[in-house]
Amino acid sequence: MKETFIENLVIEDNFRVDKVLVEPYWEQPLEMFKLSIKINNNWVFIVRRHYDFYVKDLVKLGRSHSMSKGYFCHYGKGNPLEELSDKLTSFSYIENSFDNVYKFGGNHVEYSGAFNYYIWDKNIIGVIKEKLPLIKGER
């Protein structure tokens, strides 16, 4: 997908919301709103939304970002270690996304509770890497 920057809608120290034109190969170009957060002085793309009424939600999500927490919760319980309290599906994962920032995502077995985090705190990453193989189950 090709993405073309149109304008900045909101820029703060640790996040930004931009208007972009996205050109999927399978349909007409779409104007979308893109949330990026700053991690280790890099802008990290989190999510795009179609409609302008989502801009307030993107700003709220961006303002929830704090470098001192050691992680960013895109969606989930709000803390990546809390996700480990239940059995997780076999497709739950943690992987190095870039520059020692890990993406942790998946779902819970007992209920549909998807989660997605970006984590840069080495202690949190270590705990997840240690416990994840022990609590992964089948769907």
Image (cartoon, helix red, strand yellow):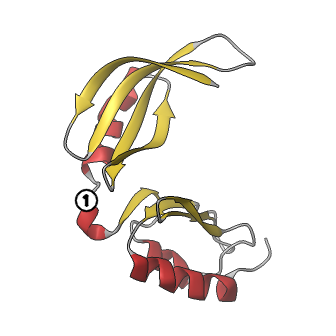
**Residue 3 appears in which quarter of the rendering?**
top right
Near-viewer residue (106 or 41): 41
Quadrant location, the N terminus = top right
In the rendered image, residue 81, in percent from the top left (x then y), is placed at: 45, 79
Near-viewer residue (52 or 1): 1
Residue most extreme to the front: 99
Residue in the picture at 35% in, 38% down: 58
Q: Is residue 45 left or right of residue 96?
A: left
Q: Residues within 10 Å of mark 1 (few under 14, many from 20)?
A: some
Where does label 1 land, which residue?
66
In the rendered image, residue 59, in percent from the top left (x then y), is placed at: 28, 38
**Residue 136 appears in which quarter of the rendering?**
bottom right
Residue most extreme to the left: 13
Residue most extreme to the right: 138
Residue 38, compared with residue 20, is above or below; it is: below
Residue 15, compared with residue 52, is above or below; it is: below
- Give the secondary structure at mark 1: loop
Quadrant location, the C terminus = bottom right
In the rendered image, residue 28, in percent from the top left (x then y), is placed at: 65, 10
